[in-house]
Image (spheres, rainbow, N blue to C red):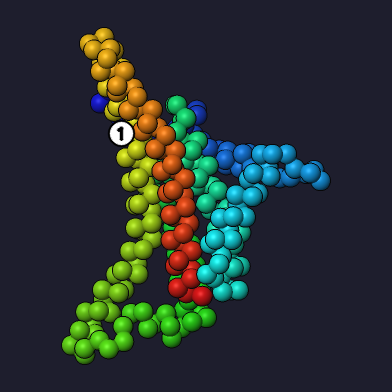
Amino acid sequence: MNENLFSSFITPTMMGLPIVILIIMFPTLLFPIPTRLINNRLVSAQQWLAQLILKQMMMMHSPKGRTWALMLISLIMFIGSTNLLGLLPHSFTPTTQLSMNLGMAIPLWAGAVITGFRYKTKASLAHFLPQGTPVPLIPMLVIIETISLFIQPMALAVRLTANITAGHLLMHLIGGAALALISISPTTALITFIILILLTILEFAVALIQAYVFTLLVSLYLHDNT
């Protein structure tokens, strides 16, 4: 069991070629483009949920920030669907890869920061030096604020990676324990299996919550710069 503990996090290959691109594109099939005058229940539910989330996120944004609406709703739908598909047995979760999460976090963070420096230069520079700072502390505070600014995309990526990876590892360990206890103590194995079911339900919630948190933090970075 210990040898296969991290096997689900290895990038899958076919004929020696990585197929992670196909896995990343697969969630788009879950959101079909409506082609009918009257949509079915699934498409209507998806549209209602997307509009509800988008309305809540865009409430605090200026007109310039609302131009990112399509980007943010696409981001939360992609991360949420990818996390949920990763809970299926023998599946690969791209969001457990720090490189992929950094690939999402850094461009979005950089776009928000560049937008702030372009349209709100004085306000963006003012974040590096709070008002009323004593003169001897100015160099130290500028360094601290600069580090905190550049650590934001890393925090975004690490938070998503750690939460999804930890949940998968815990499910793997509890599942292996339940399987090993069947022949030793069926009662204990049953209790462990119930815990596994409850943990799986929790992971479904975590998959959606982490998608929302990632997108919400990007939205807050955008709000601070527009």
What is the quadrant of residue 217 in the picture? bottom left
Q: Is residue 221 left or right of residue 70?
A: left
Can see residue 187? yes
Q: Mark 1 points at which residue?
A: 170
Please state if 176 lies on the left or on the right of 93 as rendered. Answer: left
The N terminus is located in which quarter? top left
Tell me where residue 5 sits by quadrant.
Answer: top left
Query: Where is 182 relative to 137, above or below?
Result: above
Instruction: For label 1, count other residues whose C-alpha is less than 10 Å away and answer few (under 14), some (14-19) or many (20+).
Output: some
**Residue 38, percent across and down?**
79, 44
Can I make out residue 4 in this image? no
For the point 44% across and 55% down, which residue is it? 214
Query: How many circles with numbers are drawn on the protein?
Result: 1
Badge 1 marks a residue whose secondary structure is helix
Name the spot of residue 24 as percent of width and height, x first: 53, 42
Q: Is residue 145 above or below residue 168?
A: below
Q: Residue at x 49, y 38 (%)?
A: 84
Does 184 sit left or right of 111 as displayed?
Answer: left
- As drawn, the residue found furthest toward the left would be 136
- Residue 161 screen position, x and y as percent: 37, 47
Of residues 189 and 142, the one nearer the viewer is 189
Please indicate whether residue 204 sits to the left or right of residue 78 in the image. Answer: left
**Residue 121 location in percent, x, y?**
46, 83
Q: Residue at x 32, y 28 (%)?
A: 195
Q: Which amino acid does label 1 sit on?
A: Leu
Q: Residue at x 51, y 75 (%)?
A: 226
